[in-house]
Image: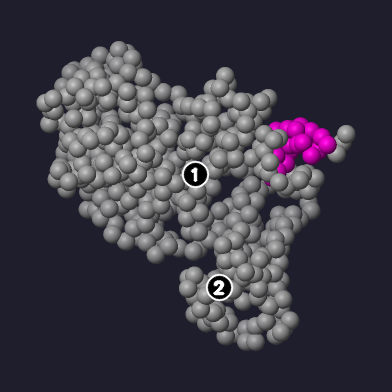
Amino acid sequence: MADIVFEYQVDGSDYHRAGEASRSTKSNLKKLGFPSDIIRRVGICMYEGEINMVIHADGGVAKVVIGLDDITIILKDKGPGIPNIDLAMQEGWSTADAQANDLGFGAGMGLPNMKRCSDEMNIDTVVGEGTTVTMKIKTK
Amino acid sequence: MIKHSVIIDKNKCVGCTSCIKACPNEAIRVRGGKARLLDQRCIDCGTCIKKCPHGAIKTTHSDLSILQKYKYTVALPDQALFGQFTKVRDPNVILTALITLGFDDICEPAASAELIAQFAIRDKINGAANKGPAISSCCPTILRLIRMRFPDLIPQVVDTIIPIEHAAIKAREKAIAETGLFPEEIGIIAIVPCPSQITESNYPETMKRRVIDECIPIVDIYGPLESAIKKVTDPIPICRSGRRGLTHAYSGGEAAARKAWNFMAVDEIQNCITMLEEIENGNIPEADYIELNACTCGCVGGSLCVGNPFNAKLRIKKMLGDLPEYFDAYDLSMENRQQLTVSKKLEYLPAFLLDEDRSMAFEKMTKIQEIRKTLPGIDCGSCGAPSCNAFAEDIVQVHADPARCVFHRKESK
């Protein structure tokens, strides 16, 4: 069985559309009949990732690979990179700007939530070049 | 399969794309030049009724002649009815007029709404509080929407029944006690603001059995009732509901009656969908209770109402000034609490599932993606589906002819 791949461009300047990739992915997972708990976790991982790309990295590409046994989410951006991953993983730590805060984002819960909702998470980051976050959610 | 109350008049339908585009749940297709409802997808929100420029979308319903079918009839006037008439400040005028139209008795859903609110306050009825805000169970369309698209939120829906159904149970009990007739000789007739309540009366979301016999839309009783209202000189003091019951007519009224002070009231179907999506994303609103109404302003905005919803809301607000906060038509300590609690749990409705078999569903989605790439992506609707995505799905799921796409036709020529 071939995996199903969806790719979304996340627009870095558009807070209103952030969440669109997550919405579309959830809708596709429901069509495929995944249990609601899996869909919720994928949805949160995607949503938080999208928001991160909008707030910190001026957008990027979100790719979802849906297999029968697991779902892989790959979020790739050409943003500033994360200088200290341990610090970024702390709840409440955020470098979000005032505009993001005004909109209710930047609470410092993004990466911790993504970690909590995925079975595996890997952050590949180079300061000044960009970040790729890969998350895996097992479906069996 | 549910038979929905929404019906399409084939004679009036010209096969335009207004309804398929407006439907929030992709539940309509145009086939053979006429709109067709997909029963498994419809949530009875009534958006198509409001949007159809040709008046071709209606509901199945009864009219006043149905009163002849029963030996004894009880009217259940939805709260929204009270906002439909100009310069009527006294609910008793409307209730008296209903009696003159031939109903033997009246049982107000507003009084039941009051009781359910009291029950919620005293017994602290909430959803699963640890998972986020409790979600109101007052709008059947929202319940169906949650069942189809947000099954993960089902545990958060409060487990109290819809007020009009409690009114129906009480109405029949009282009628049997007073008349000695058999239950089937008594007609419990709801006067409703929306198609959702009509479908609900036939297929209750939260109860095991039907309790309402007939539904008359507000729009269909409006004419005779307005004439009757003009003739009322000496209104009978029938009204047994207070402010807390009547406010259920508009958005926010139910939450306020439950004294859920930290509440959020969301109205209009698209806003409700957005809110549910946000909750599902883990973006939990800072409220303890969320009231969701599919129609603008709540029930006063139902597609079977007559008046402008904002106007109707204002009229009801004026009416409230002369009512007590609670009328306490029912005594909670005497009431059967079981009766106020759902007797059927909400269950997931897999209306969007491609196939029961996961690997089959994968195959279908792969095909859909391939077909989707060949479509123009402008969602013009001329194929009869609301979007290119939906059309690609139709090709795979129900073997819709790809040549229905005008771009396909153009290229193959």
Name above or below for residue B233 compared with residue B347.
above
Range drawn in magenta: B388-410
Image quadrant assignment for residue A123 = bottom right
- What is the crowding at mark 1: few (fewer than 14 residues within 10 Å), some, or many (at least 20)? many
Q: From this view, report whether residue A69 is shown above or below residue B390.
A: below
- Position in image of residue A97 (x %, y %): 54, 79
Amino acid at dot 2: Gly
Q: Looking at the image, what colour scheme do you see?
A: one colour
Q: Residue at x 69, y 35 (%)?
A: B382
Q: Is residue A31 visible?
A: yes
Answer left or right for B180 relative to B402: left
Chain letter, disc 1 residue: B
Whole-percent x, y for residue B393 in the image: 70, 41
Inter-mark Cα distance, 1 to 2: 28 Å
Viewer-proximal residue among B25 and A74? B25
Choose top left, top right, bottom left or bottom right for residue B220.
top left
Residue type at mark 1 is Leu
Q: Residue at x 50, y 48 (%)?
A: B270
Give the secondary structure at mark 1. helix
Residue B403 locus on image (x, y percent): 79, 33
**Which disc, if any, is residue A110?**
2
Rendered image: mark on residue B180: none
Does the magenta stretch mainly form a helix, a strand or a loop? helix
Q: Residue at x 79, y 53 (%)?
A: A2
**Residue farthest right in this picture:** B413
On screen, residue B397 versus residue B198, left or right, reads right
Seen at 62% across and 83% down, the residue is A85
Q: Residues within 10 Å of mark 2 (few under 14, many from 20)?
A: many
From the image, tell me which residue sits under label 1: B145
**Which of the pair B179/B67 is nearer the observer?**
B67
